[in-house]
Amino acid sequence: MLLLLLAACPDPGGIDLLPGGDTAAVDTGDSPEPIGDTGDTAEPDEVPDEPEPDHVVDCAGGGDFTSITAAIDAAHSGERIGLRACTYTENLDYRGKTLDIYGLAPRSQVVIVAAARGPVVTAVRGESVGTRLAHVTLSGGANGYGAALYVDRALFTLQDAVVTGNGSSNTGSTHYQSAASVRFIDVELHDNEVSGRQGMEVYANDGSLHLQRVTMRCAGAPYGIYQHVCLLMTDSTLDCAEADYGVVVSGGELHVRRSRIDAGSVGVYAEDNADTRNERVWLYNTAVVARDYAVNTQYMHVKVRNSVLLGDRALSLNRPHADSYLYSSAFVGDRCAVDDDASPYVAAYNAIGDSPDCGFAGTDTITGDPGFVDAPGDLHLAAGSPLVDAGDPDPGENDADGTRNDIGIYGGNEGDGPR
């Protein structure tokens, strides 16, 4: 019996982006030009360190099978399938089996190109803990939802992978999940063709999504991530400067640590229902940069610590949960630092630069030039910055070197983490 580790997030309202509950692949037309086996999607890397597989796939005939699909058909749940360097032209379906499938060569040399219209990889039949695809490049998928990866009511991990050259349109996405728990670890998403008024790179509908050391470039999509799930983003970079929205949270939760989100109009937009305000947006050691709103929240439980928000309006709080707080962070906006409606929340040891405070009622607030090295690109604090040793004085929030907390993304005990 499959046990899904899903978050209890309410059914969202908001704009209609659901595919009608249909879990079948959606045909949207011709596949984009795949990248082939040129290996130009990643820098040369080391041969993966993995255990001996139960089955070996080699399209040149040197293994147990010449296709991954044949190996999946023959394998039993719990087994491992190793892929030798090759370009495999096929659409993969895990067929309800819990399989660990991984490249035996660097990911740039193990390329899976969709052979037909539809997702490159599908897991929709209750695949359980241990289902993984690693050390590969995924390309050539064409689908309305999930051109590269489509996961429904399953547990799935994509690790050490490049997702590029896949195509979607209209309300489509590169990755789609529903009622699923998905992890991306050391994954790059770039140069996927996502278009249409409501297109997005990632559409996560119910369940949970963890992005760990993920780099995503949003090319042509209005949305980077549109989600109704509990999304945890750690040590990741979301470059959606050419898109309208970086992350949209509608009836879900967002927890971001040691990461950066750039967007054209709104970095993070998050909304909950007016009668609950229990869903959370928590930003720790995170930078959010956008033209209009860095972060715009409606009826959310908001916690921001050691972060930097830059935009015309850095942070907009509309009736937040009473336990919301802002600590040791910089809110810099041309029109507003923190725009709120006088709802109760706690704010202390923050900086607002030269921005209008718009009624911001924080204590121990620093105004004036924050002294970044070169904002928005380099948010380190320059020598003499008033934000040095000016954050939360609680010893438990000290910087990694034991000194008092610095305001900004490099302060606090997580401040020396990767960017």
Image (tube, rainbow, N blue to C red):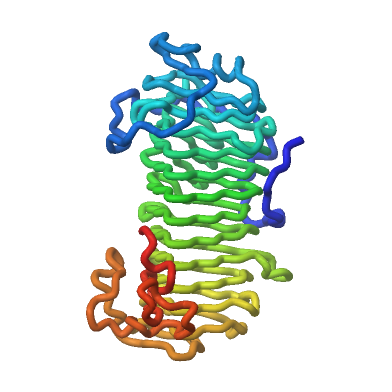
**In the depicted structure, whether residue 154 falls above or below residue 63:** below
Residue 189 location (% of width, % of height): 41, 42
**In the depicted structure, whether residue 276 falls above or below residue 106:** below
In front of the other: 97 or 218 = 97
In front of the other: 31 or 4 = 4
Quarter of the figure that contains the N terminus: top right
Q: Is 165 displayed left or right of 339 in the figure?
A: left
Q: Can residue 388 be seen here?
A: yes
In front of the other: 191 or 306 = 306
Residue 372 is drawn in which quadrant?
bottom left
Residue at (39% x, 75% y) in the render: 399
Residue 281 location (% of width, % of height): 56, 66
Quarter of the figure that contains the C terminus: bottom left
Residue at (51% x, 74% y) in the render: 316
Residue 135 is drawn in which quadrant?
top left
Q: Is 370 displayed left or right of 348 in the figure?
A: left
Residue 200 location (% of width, % of height): 49, 46
Q: Can residue 147 be seen here?
A: no
Which residue is the extreme one toward the front? 52
Which residue is the extreme one toward the top? 61
Residue at (37% x, 58% y) in the render: 418
**In the depicted structure, whether residue 52 falls above or below residue 14:** above
In front of the other: 159 or 364 = 159
Residue 22 location (% of width, % of height): 68, 34
Residue at (22% x, 79% y) in the render: 383
- How many numbered tags mark residues here? 0
